[in-house]
Amino acid sequence: MLTAGKGKYKVWLKEARQGKDLVLFLGGGERTHIGSVVVCAPGKPAKVINRKGHYDWMVAMPIAEKKSRKTKKAVVCIAGIHVNNASKKEIEILKKNCKKIEDYIR
């Protein structure tokens, strides 16, 4: 498991295999949930399933795309990060922590 940040700004990424493909779980904040699902395959545009009012795809998409590109596998990323009444500053902290997770991906 990869992690970045501390306290309510901590985000994490877990990985599971689905046959030859990968499933990523991106969560964190005060309450993990399912906000968005990103599906991608090498060389293809990513597809997003998004719950109304959720923006988790914005951090999940680059993570899923990078993992797919690096591994040459199909990837599904299920994402949900929540901080109650998050300010713009808090959202930026969470986004930076997700970027750190993305940077860790090999």
Image: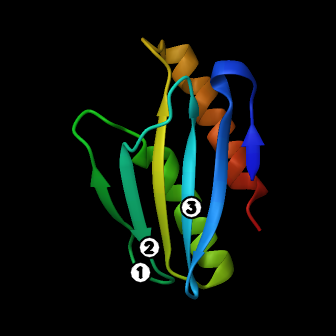
- Coordinates of residue 80 in the picture (x, y in percent): 46, 40
The relative height of residue 30 versus residue 53 in the rendered view (above or below) is above
- Coordinates of residue 83 in the picture (x, y in percent): 50, 20
Residue of label 1: 44
Residue of label 2: 40
Q: Amino acid at mark 1?
A: Lys
Crowd around label 3: few <14 · some 14–19 · many ≥20 (10 Å): many
Q: Residue furthest left?
A: 52
Q: Cα distance, mark 1 to mark 3?
A: 18 Å
**Who comes first in sequence, dot 3 or dot 2?**
3
Residue of label 3: 24
Residue depicted at 75% across the width and 42% down the height: 3
Nearer the observer: mark 1 or 2; the answer is 2
Q: Nearer the viewer, residue 94 or 22?
A: 22
Helix, strand or loop at label 2? It is: strand
Q: Amino acid at mark 2?
A: Cys
The relative height of residue 29 versus residue 1 in the rendered view (above or below) is above
